[in-house]
Image (cartoon, helix red, strand yellow):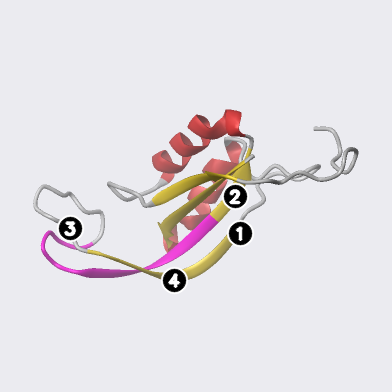
Amino acid sequence: MDCLVIYVPTDAAHAVRQAIGDAGAGRLGNYSHCSFSAEGTGRFMPLPGAHPAIGAVGSPEEVPETRIEAIYPRSRRDAIVNAALSAHPYETPAFMTFLIDASLPAGSWPEA
């Protein structure tokens, strides 16, 4: 299993959660679209050549953002990341993926 962590302007968080869930993220036993979100402030300054969705080139910006976390089978990584990037409004979204250990004793997970 892997985990996706992505930072999204708060007003776009629902669309990104829906997109990654539809692509297969957040499947836990008999549940789908499982994720965790936390609110915060994103900070950035668009450099020359950028085409920012929010703010202006050369001007520091602060935006209410939501950190979304969801796990997924490694085999779904490309589909999940592509879904997240397609639903995200930023030109260059901040995200990371990493390996996690979500194992439980044999027989603990219902069959999908």
Q: Is residue 62 magenta?
A: yes
The answer to whether 13 is drawn above or below residue 99 in the figure is: below
Residue drawn at 54 percent across, 42 percent down: 20
> In 3D space, how far apart are the residues under numbered discs 1 and 3 (Cα atoms)?
28 Å
Q: Is residue 65 left or right of residue 69?
A: left
Name the amino acid type tagged 1.
Phe
Name the amino acid type tagged 2.
Ala
Q: Quadrant of residue 112?
A: top right
User: Which of the marked residues, 1 or 3, is nearer the chain's N terminus?
Assistant: 1
Residue 99 numbered mark, or none: none
For label 1, the residue is 36
For label 3, the residue is 46
Label 1 environment density (alpha carbons within 10 Å; few <14, some 14–19, many ≥20): few
- Tell me whether circle 1 and circle 2 mark residues in contact (CB < 8 Å): yes
Look at the numbered disc 3 and give the secondary structure of its residue.
Answer: loop
Residue 40 numbered mark, or none: 4
User: Which of the marked residues, 3 or 4, is nearer the chain's N terminus?
Assistant: 4
> In 3D space, how far apart are the residues under numbered discs 2 and 3 (Cα atoms)?
28 Å
Residue drawn at 52 percent across, 42 percent down: 19
User: Which of the marked residues, 2 or 3, is nearer the chain's N terminus?
Assistant: 3
Q: Quadrant of residue 58?
A: bottom left
